[in-house]
Image (cartoon, grey):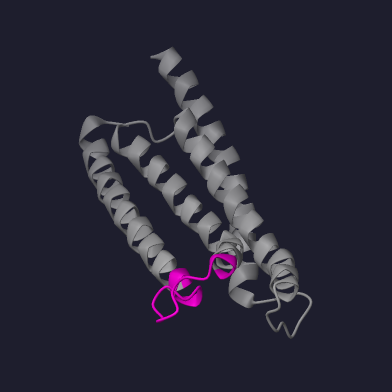
């Protein structure tokens, strides 16, 4: 890619990295504040340690999603440094895909069982939320995108060998 074409891509990737950093940190703070509230941190009786453990387990899908955002941040960072098809980008896309897919499986199948075990009322055995299903499917798609980026990187390296 010519240097003049790369600068806008690198600048855009740097902005995306900053946005993903801020989004991940803000969403993590919101998640922590929310779960602390569910565990009683803001009530006069104070924090219930058993509820806090339960809330941590119930947060697993959200934490996996935040991990996916953070991994995507790494891909943007690598592109900002001029390596849009590098090994780190491929690993980031694969990690994003795996985390989103695992988050969906956890949210759909594991969390309802954990919630019932913890004494929370669960109306269904499987929480088939459309958004969760879409995120899981996007995760599978991101695994495929990781393969495409790996092939593009190999092609780029091969072309560079010719010139």
Q: Is residue 81 above or below residue 74?
A: above
Within the image, what quadrant is residue 80 found in?
A: top left
Q: In the picture, which quadrant includes the N terminus?
A: top left
Q: Tell which of 70 and 52 is nearer to you.
A: 52
For the point 75% across and 70% down, the residue is: 113
Dividing the picture into quarters, in which one does residue 163 lie?
A: top left
Decide if residue 5 is on the left or right side of residue 132. Answer: left
Start-end of magenta stretch: 35-51
Depicted 35 relative to depicted 24: above or below: below
Choose between 159 and 9: the one closer to the eye: 9
Look at 27% across and 31% down and name the residue there: 2
Residue 57: say if magenta. no
Does the stretch in magenta take in 41? yes
- Could you say where residue 39 lies in the image, as x and y percent from the top left? 50, 73
Residue placed most toward the observer, 104 or 149:
104
Residue at figure coordinates x 34%, y 54% from the top left: 20
Count numbered badges in the picture: 0
For residue 83, side relative to residue 127 (left or right): left
Residue 15 x, y percent position in the rendering: 25, 50
The front one of 20 and 6 is 20
- The spot of residue 90 in percent (x, y) is 51, 36
| Residue at the far front in the pictured view | 45
8 to 29, vertically: above or below:
above
Q: Is residue 124 left or right of residue 103?
A: right
- Residue occupying image coordinates x 22% and y 39%: 7
Task: From this view, report whether residue 38 is shown above or below residue 79.
Answer: below
């Amino acid at each position: 890619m010519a240097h003049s074409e790369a600068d806008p891509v690198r600048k855009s990737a740097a902005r995306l990295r900053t946005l993903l950093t801020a989004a991940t940190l803000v969403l993590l703070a919101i998640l922590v504040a929310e779960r602390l509230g569910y565990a009683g941190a803001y009530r006069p009786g104070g924090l219930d340690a058993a509820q806090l453990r339960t809330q941590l387990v119930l947060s697993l899908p959200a934490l996996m999603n935040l991990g996916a955002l953070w991994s995507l941040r790494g891909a943007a960072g690598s592109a900002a440094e001029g390596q849009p098809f590098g090994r780190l980008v491929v690993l980031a896309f694969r990690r994003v895909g795996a985390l989103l897919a695992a988050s969906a499986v956890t949210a759909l199948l594991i969390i309802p069982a954990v919630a019932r075990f913890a004494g929370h009322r669960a109306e269904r055995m499987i929480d088939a939320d459309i958004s969760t299903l879409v995120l899981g499917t996007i995760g599978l798609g991101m695994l495929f995108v990781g393969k495409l980026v790996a092939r593009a990187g190999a092609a780029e390296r091969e072309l560079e060998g010719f010139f």
